[in-house]
Image (cartoon, grey):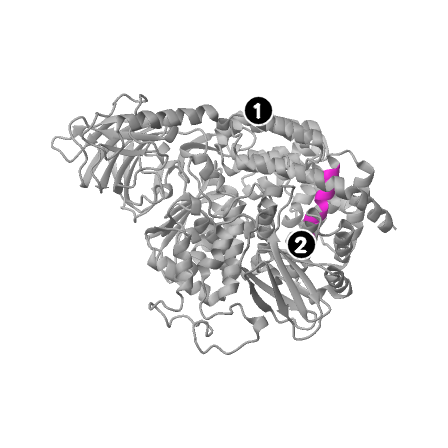
Amino acid sequence: MLLRSRFLICLRFVILLSGLFVGNHGQTPVNTDTNVLPFPWTKMRLPDTVKPQHYDLLIKPNLTSLTFSGSVEILLEVEKDTRAIILHSKNLQISRALFLDSRPPLDLRVSEFKPHDQIALFSDHFTFTRGRHVIRLEFSANLSDNFHGFYKGTYTTSSGEVRILASTQFEATYARLAFPCFDEPAFKANFTIRVQRESRHISISNMPKLRSVDLGDGLFEDQFDTSVKMSTYLVAFIICDFPSISKKSQHGVEISVYTVPEKISQAEYALNTAVTLLDFYDDYFDIPYPLPKHDLAAIPDFQSGAMENWGLSTYRESGLLFDPEKSSSSDKQGITKVIAHELAHQWFGNLVTMQWWNDLWLNEGFAKFMEFVSVNITHPELQVDDYFLEKCFTAMSVDSLSSSHPISTPVENPAQISEMFDDVSYQKGACILNMLRDFLTPEAFKYGIILYLKKHSYQNTANAHLWESLTNICTSGSDSGRLKLDGFCSKKRPETPESQKWFMEDSIDVRAIMDTWTLQEGFPLITVEVKGREVLLKQERFLKGADSTKSSQKVLWQVPLTYITSQNHEVQRFLLKSERDVLHLPEEVKWVKFNVDLRGFYVVHYESGGWDALIKQLQDDHTVFSSNDRASLIHDIFQLVSIEKVRLDEALNLSVYLSGESEIMPVTQGFSELVPLYKLMEKRNMEELENQLKGHLVKLFKSLIDKQSWTDEGSVSERVLRNYLLLFACVRRYPSCISTATDLFQRWRESDGKMWLPVDVRLVVFTEGARTDEGWDFLLEKYLRSASPSEKSLIKAALTYSPLTHKLQWLLDRSIDGNILKTHELPSLIISVSKNQNGYKLAWEFLKANWGKLVKKFDLGSSAISRMAVGVTNQYSTREMLEEVQSFFTSLTPEQGSELRSIQQALQKIQENIRWMDKNIPLLKVWLDAHSS
């Protein structure tokens, strides 16, 4: 870090002495030798005085030599005279650069600055004057061997033939790996793309193909229509041999799904879902989808879950393909949400794009939020509302650490940008939007985002633009009568009691409220104390760990509070703007419950007997609270234990009510809080107490486990819960579960896998089978032969759950080369093994030994690297392991990831685990002893 900083400081000093900034013409000529100083630009961001208007891009891939070449002509708008044009290029060989305005075209000289992925184009004979100019660059490169840029992929047919394809993944900063370009989201332009290919392949891109030109010798050139104005990260092209199925939406958009030939029968659900969702968004946003087609392509090698390229979204096979015979209800739910997410991006992200990556959440938070809004309306049977809380709880677990970051936070280099693709941008972003929607009312919120999208179409925005549209709902003149805003904008709104009002003023300053949620990290802890008819409120940051500097800082949020009481179950509202405030109730109550259905992004602590009253109500009749409220009570009280606001025994007392619970969210939240306790013990060799807690949990959920059938009957949530409960029961060696699962696996194996198994219990059966060498080997054989991504995913999980250490080691060793498992599956495989009591040490040793290869394959700052760094280590709970993890990560250089935020999160999580165990293990033992009978 120090050496690199000194280098950049020296570089800037040399350039200052030379006077060679872009736009400073008429002075010393720019040095034209590549990689020789000075380079005429010092900043990571490109100058904003030269803007691309149109790219004419030709790509010529060779899938035999695994190389490509091409050319690009860029129409530029130069706003200020400049000596050099600065743009992005990485790992490209630039063979020629031309200035096409002159006749004949003039050669341009090229200089490269690799630390910033930048090249400079200039001439010894002229400067680029204000106005429009066209440049042409010719280039070549190898197809990338990771998952970014223009990269190679493969798939294997049922006959064993390996076939090659090439596809793109340009978000966030990887278009520069495929062609020279202005690779920042604000530089929107139109793209006309041509792709040359062999006759055995097809090519697809963002826009419809206009024609194919026969070039002879089995070579064709596909010419695509010119795109709408868009950012470089949304450009896409694929060369493959995939077939497709197609269907027109109600609005006339041609929708197609592409996949490998032997899996095309699994594409129908995605096609029908995409048609339904695209029509929904078209109507919901009141803005027509602007392209004539949208393709969805299942890519065999794909690191991200999916990518929203305009007109050509790309997916993992498991995120798009659905086999009615082998895919589970949770698979269907997941596929539907992924498609909903990517199609929401066609408006949020593609049509309106963030100005810079610091506001990535405007893309990802909105898409995550809209996947729940859209699927809840279009596919109510999938019950996605049951799972929104989980997203908020996940975000809180990250945002409660001092290593978190504001939703909108400054970033500069590619690694920092990649780290923005995290739970704060996605999950917290979605949760605060849900809170804002409840605050403004759904209709007013919808109208505000429509105003935002219409006003800023084909442009770039920052936070303030969104808040402006949501603040000016009532003053905007456009379409003012189209939506019913329930009197929201009326000066003659009926009077309501103070306790039911969001607002104490006539005007609403959305920006003032939301800046407190997007420009500062963390979230509030709301402390509630009921004294007669008064409710005393206090807010402070919810912060884990012992970071006294941050905890002593006074941070305030404007918090939209919601609450119900024992006497009134109608939702009451109050906007808390100060550190302390007082609510006045119309009557005395037994209890008050804040954050109704987790509509807000905050944790609540009930002082002076408040928790006792809520626990008593749960034990007497838990159905008084909604299932979401019950889940949030479970979450909050255990989180409060971690910051020593509540004793562990009080939280455990609350959890006892779960013996009578049956709804998915409270049950799974109970597991989420209680299972990690014994997972921490597994790393401390506390077998006696560990087994005591495991036995208690089996007893706690025994009644619900015994009610489960080994079928696919029931609602989606009932089916997902069935899988969860039976898997827990078998892993905890519950006799009746073991017996049934063992019998089903033996019969399935005897039939050579042909016997039909209920889809929703297959993971349970496979996991039991993977406990023996013979069963494990049989499952691996079925994995290698299966054409169903859903089935492969279940088998892979079962293989990693096995107690057979030698099999886990074999799986890790074989996964790095991508021959047994696709390499993009590696992060989830390593994390899954790390959660195995018999595999956590293997996973850590593997991560250490292969860190360099993993960083090269998945890229520094990527979500894959971040997930592995945190996921493999987040259940360690000893000082010895902390020192070992700390020693390894501090031995890395910045280029290897030593400065990644995820590494700080990993270390803080281990420190938090140690602190929690030291404080609470004695309490846990006493409580379990008292409840053992």
Categorize mark 1 by other alpha carbons within 10 Å: few (<14), some (14-19), many (20+): few
| Secondary element at tag 1 | loop
Q: Is residue 268 left or right of residue 327?
A: left
Report which residue position mark 1 lands on.
891
Return the residue nearer the eye: 193 or 755.
Answer: 193
Looking at the image, is 848 positioned above or below residue 660? above
Residue 310 can be seen in this image: yes
Residue drawn at x 43%, y 60% is 280
Residue 101, position in %: x, y? 15, 36
Categorize mark 2 by other alpha carbons within 10 Å: few (<14), some (14-19), many (20+): some
Return the residue nearer the eye: 268 or 876.
Answer: 876
432 in the magenta segment: no
Identify the main secondary structure in magenta. helix
Residue 155, position in %: x, y? 47, 34
Contact between labelled residues 1 and 2, with CB atoms less than 8 Å apart: no
Return the residue nearer the eye: 842 or 400.
Answer: 400
Residue 316, position in %: x, y? 49, 41
Report which residue position mark 2 lands on.
636
676 in the magenta segment: yes
Q: Quadrant of residue 163?
A: top left
Return the residue nearer the eye: 828 or 622.
Answer: 622
Q: Is residue 858 left or right of residue 698?
A: left
Residue drawn at x 19%, y 39% is 133
Residue 186, position in %: x, y? 34, 45
Residue 248 can be seen in this image: no
> Where residue 738 is drawn, which disc sits there?
none
Q: Using the numbered discs, state the Cα–Cα distance from disc 2 to disc 1 in whole angstroms.
A: 37 Å
Image: magenta residue range: 666-681
Residue drawn at x 45%, y 57% is 277
Q: Quadrant of residue 386?
A: bottom right
Give, as a three-letter code, the residue at label 1. Ser
Looking at the image, is 558 positioned above or below residue 694? below
